[in-house]
């Protein structure tokens, strides 16, 4: 009996070895493709630069901006096909995600790239809407500077919506920086946000991610092709061979990807960046679109990643969000935090002032062409987290307000 059992086990193990050798990817079909190299070479970086320049030339042109989404899709696929013929893009990696307006692809070295089919501002264009001022302060900045309070905390605004030149957004953030600093929250404004900058969030009590966001879809697998989708935060830092080599491990590990020739970070970026030295309870407020997923497919990956990185609480939006609404919610929420209220109460006050979601706000402003789904602010983590505002500061501020 033991002999028969021994023979059966031997035969079974032999069959298992044979199957695994014949179909090696079946064991790990659910995992993204791993690159053979552990770091990028100078040749890899130069090769990617050719692709990045071609993609940036396409997406940055006035002709591309004038195209419809379908025409952009066709132009992007034509560009990627040509790059594939030159050996600069993996042909089988090209993945069209019409729902999220993104075409994903892989460089020959294994790094992931993408092309946005829609300008992030297009979906939230309010140029036809007559807006009331969303920044209504109880005191003027001049008055506050004359009676500046003692600093009790620090904040950083990571501003990556644009390069600030002729920007309609930037002046608001410059104002908020001065306003909050005068109230004792020493606020800095980073207008050239880099990958390296995002590794320093632990230096601040409050971090604000004022940037565009998107959903990135990538195709992987050899015998069984699969796709994976995750939220990304888009930066304005341009990809260069030098930076590619600097960020090489993160690029190959897909913690950083490149979209339209610019860097973007995935949730795993924050997990890795703060693995050995986590943030010490930083409050993180994000204005990025699709931070928490989309209707019917909520995704807490980015929020969970920041919490695992040491944030005490994270605020982000489900769906695309109107920029004026997110800025208004940001403005009022931070003001309430400075007054000494916990984040849950601060957000509740902001929503009571500007609306539970951006469609409520939009219609209240007289808007007639709302985007498809309402953007809803969500909290992840400790909803009672708050800034360490001294009692004497709270009293003076609440009296002034």
Image: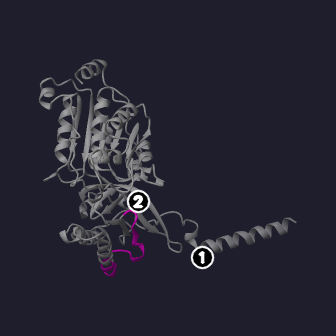
Q: Which residue is mark 2?
A: 253
- State which quadrant residue 344 falls in: top left
As drawn, 341 above or below 237: above
Which residue is at the front of the view, 358 or 104?
358
Q: Which residue is mark 1?
A: 22
Where in the figure is residue 134, as x and y percent of width and height? Answer: 23, 40
The answer to which of 144 and 279 lies nearer the viewer is 144
> Which of marks 2 and 1 precedes in the sequence?
1
The answer to whether one can see residue 196 in this image is no
Residue at the (30%, 48%) spot, across then down: 362
- Name the spot of residue 394 as percent of width and height, x first: 29, 21
Residue 278 drawn at (x, y percent): 39, 40
Residue at image position (78%, 69%) is 8
Where residue 166 appears, x then y in whole percent? 13, 53
Q: Is residue 91 above or below residue 45?
A: below
Per the rendered image, the range of residues in magenta is: 81-100
Q: Is residue 219 magenta?
A: no
Which element carries disc 2, helix, strand or loop? Answer: loop
């Amino acid at each position: 009996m033991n002999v028969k059992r021994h023979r059966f086990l031997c035969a079974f193990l032999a069959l298992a070895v044979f199957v695994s050798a014949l179909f090696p990817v079946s064991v790990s079909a659910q995992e993204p493709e791993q690159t053979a190299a552990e770091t990028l070479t100078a040749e890899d970086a130069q090769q990617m630069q050719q692709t990045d320049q071609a993609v940036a030339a396409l997406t940055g042109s006035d002709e591309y901006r004038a195209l419809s989404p379908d025409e952009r899709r066709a132009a992007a696929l034509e560009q990627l096909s040509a790059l594939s013929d030159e050996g600069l893009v993996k042909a089988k990696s090209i993945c069209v995600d019409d729902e999220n307006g993104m075409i994903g692809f892989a460089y020959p070295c294994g790094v992931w790239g993408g092309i946005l089919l829609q300008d992030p501002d297009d979906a939230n264009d309010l140029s036809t809407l007559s807006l009331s001022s969303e920044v209504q302060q109880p005191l003027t900045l001049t008055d506050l500077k004359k009676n500046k309070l003692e600093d009790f905390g620090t904040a950083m605004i990571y501003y990556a919506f644009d390069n600030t030149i002729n920007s309609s957004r930037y002046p608001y953030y410059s104002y908020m920086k001065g306003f909050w600093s005068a109230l004792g929250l020493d606020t800095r404004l980073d207008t050239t946000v880099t990958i390296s900058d995002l590794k320093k969030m632990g230096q601040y009590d409050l971090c604000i991610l004022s940037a565009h966001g998107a959903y990135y879809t990538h195709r992987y697998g050899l015998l069984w092709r699969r796709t994976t989708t995750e939220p990304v935060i888009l930066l304005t830092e341009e990809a260069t061979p030098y930076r590619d080599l600097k960020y090489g491990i993160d690029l190959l590990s897909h913690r950083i990807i490149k979209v339209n020739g610019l860097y973007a970070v995935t949730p795993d970026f924050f997990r890795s960046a703060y693995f050995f030295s986590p943030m010490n309870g930083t409050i993180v407020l994000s204005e990025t679109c699709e931070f928490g997923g989309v209707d019917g497919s909520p995704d807490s990956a980015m929020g969970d990643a920041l919490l695992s990185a040491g944030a005490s609480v994270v605020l982000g939006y489900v769906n695309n969000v109107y920029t004026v609404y997110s800025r208004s919610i940001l403005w009022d929420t931070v003001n309430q935090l400075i007054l000494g209220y916990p984040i849950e109460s601060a957000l509740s006050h902001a929503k009571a002032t500007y609306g539970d979601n951006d469609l409520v706000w939009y219609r209240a402003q007289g808007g007639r062409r709302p985007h498809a789904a309402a953007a809803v602010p969500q909290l992840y983590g400790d909803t009672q987290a708050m800034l360490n505002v001294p009692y004497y500061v709270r009293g003076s501020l609440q009296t002034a307000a």
